[in-house]
Amino acid sequence: MTKEVLPLGTIYVSPRVIATIAYQAALQSYGVVGLAHKNFFYGVSHKLVKDPLHGVEVHYDGVEIRIDIYIIVEYGTRISAVASSVRDTVRYQVEKALGLPVACVNVHVRGLRISEVD
Amino acid sequence: MRIEKERGQSPDHAPRAKEQVNGAVLKLMVEAGLTWLRTNQQIVNSLNVFPVPDGDTGTNMVLTMQAAYEEISNGKENNFGKVAHAIAHGALMGARGNSGVILSQIWRGFARAVDNIETLDVPTFVKALASARDTAYKGVVRPVEGTILTVIKDVATAAQEALPETNDLLQLLERIVKAADDSVQRTPELLPVLKEAGVVDSGGKGLFFILEGMLRYAKGMPLDAPTSTVMPIASMNLQRTMEIIEPGQDVEVVIDFRPYNKLDIETFYRDLEKMGTSIQLGEGDGIYRLHIHVSDGRQYEPIEYVKQVGIFTKVAMENLAAQMEQSEEKSGIAQLTLAPVEPGQIAAVAVAPGPGIARVFASLGAAAIVHGGQTMNPSTQEILSAFENLPTDKIVILPNNKNIIRTAEAAKELTVKKVAVIPSRSVPQGLAAIMHLSPHEDFNTVISEMEEALLQVETGEITRATRSVEIDGISVKEGEFIALHNGNLVAASSSLKDITLELLQIAHADHFELITLFYGKDLTKQEANQIADEIRFAYPEQEIEVQDGGQPHYYFIISIE
């Protein structure tokens, strides 16, 4: 739970909110075709997730927000470029929405989707 | 320029009214697209507001296209399909950034449709563009319209519509460049964030430049002078142009003017290019704003020139070299988000020796930061002015250095506000204290809680000896690393790693829970992490944190709590 103490009251933001913002940002990111389950073994049977909390982990230790995000990438794209743009987009969107700094975004590429074979 | 030369040598390569082209022509076209994109790179960069406004779209697209071109630059291949595949491969390997990845997918789809094709004709070109669009759209779950994706879609549609009307590739290229241009102009209607910023989409504009470069080459137009554009004044980002100071172009001149007659943009650009670089022209309500970099001594030339074409309303001149230094200095402080203060609350003023430490204090609720520390003590006036304007009368000061405590006490005498100096002798003490800052609580209670907190933390500092000396039985040679535990000299060594471990041992770090290392500006993150790893190995029970402190002189400031 992130907390911002303001003069007229305190605003609490739950990790689910942050996860949802990150989820939306990742899905709009080019090259990402879905989010995967963060638990690898569970993920094999549930490859794509709809619930943001399953594909995104949000850690808040009272000082900074850390995000782990698990993605499936389109085969044939440059994975490092896709992953770094996910990282930048997620950080930017979360910081923009919450006004709180994000310390780090770790992107885990959990699979490739092959839609076209060259 | 290379293209001109090559074309001069083999004039039959210029595809005028061509029904078919081979791989060698494709190579020249790609080079032309890359050249034109590179020429207009800054324009594309300046438009970048989506998905992250970091001003690198143009650079990323150029690097991607360059990797694509390098794949074919030395080849003598004439087979169109093979050249296209090589381009797609190069673009994939060199893809940079969001727009670069999309560009590589466009090439991949394009190449797939021309597999095994010896020469390209109009129907194949149309089919290849459709395939490029399809592949590009497959790479994302939620395509955002108003981006490069929309532009390739509109290009493919325009090509499809032109198919029954022409079998001339040049005519087709003209149609799609027009379609790309129109599509780019429509992007703000589709993507609100673009409209808000008053720009068109950067990636889409980049794709347009690639296509237009091909067309310009086919028509024999030059590719080395940036396109003469006028952008809305609101979207002129003069901040970013500072990053690209060309040697010798030291003075930035910005002139606002109202032209007598309609401005001839082409001539205007051509004349100004003789005077300087980084030319940008903006327009809003009939007022034009010219931005140009010129060398020192020539700064009056653009003004004289503008006087011939219109009446200038305002001139601003800045020395770029000096500006750069200043912005570097400021960059550490500028990003700080300080805690807001309401009347009646307790506001904390912290003295921080480095930008990283300042950020940590700010994130913990400091309402003002004064920069200073060992060998750069802030003056009483600096501390005073940090809090005089805060809208509250209850102030706590964290000096965070034993030499600054007295200065802070002096500030107390010069104000009518209620000021308490928490005698924090080090950064870790200051951090421990600010953790107990509750802005709404009773002033005296907060002060005593903060003062108590000072004792709950051990401070370690590692710096270099400035002279040889013997203190408390420890002899130190000049230049050696020395370790201070709560301000007392405890060890000296020539190895930073050894002395850090020794210091932790002396401080009984194994009795504590958390060790935070603030590394100074003389260490890289990597070096700091290496030492942190050694510490993790030696202290498996303790949690080790590494923070960029950015302080001078001190390699590490260590908080043990």
Image (cartoon, coloured by chain):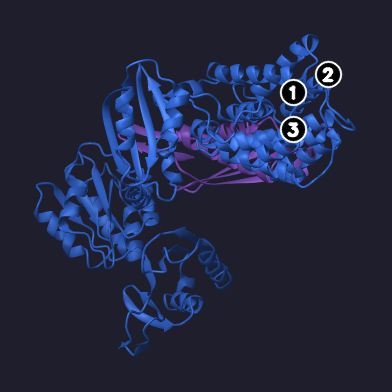
Chain colours: A purple, B blue
Query: Please, which chain is the residue tagged with disc 2 on?
Result: B
Q: Up-down: is B540 above or below B62?
A: below
The disc labelled 3 sits on which kind of residue?
Answer: Pro
Residue assigned mark 3? B11
Mark 3 and mark 2, same subunit?
yes
The disc labelled 1 sits on which kind of residue?
Answer: Arg
Residue assigned mark 2? B123
Which badge, 3 or 1, comes first in the chain's sequence? 3
The residues bearing labels 2 and 1 have C-alpha atoms spaced at a distance of 18 Å
Residue B494 in view: yes
Query: Please, which chain is the residue tagged with disc 1 on?
Result: B
Callout 2: SS: helix
Q: Quadrant of the C terminus of chain B?
A: bottom left
Give how far across and how far down residue B486 sits, in percent: 33, 72
- Residue under the image location 54 percent in, 35 percent down: A18
- Residue under the image location 27 percent in, 68 percent down: B375
- Residue under the image location 33 percent in, 79 percent down: B466
Query: Please, which chain is the residue tagged with disc 3 on?
Result: B
The residues bearing labels 3 and 2 have C-alpha atoms spaced at a distance of 25 Å
Residue B379, picture quadrant: bottom left
Callout 1: SS: loop
Give how far across and how far down residue B549 sits, in percent: 41, 59
Tell which tag, 3 or 1, sits nearer the viewer: 3
Residue B123, picture quadrant: top right
Residue assigned mark 1? B16
Marks 1 and 2: in contact by CB < 8 Å? no
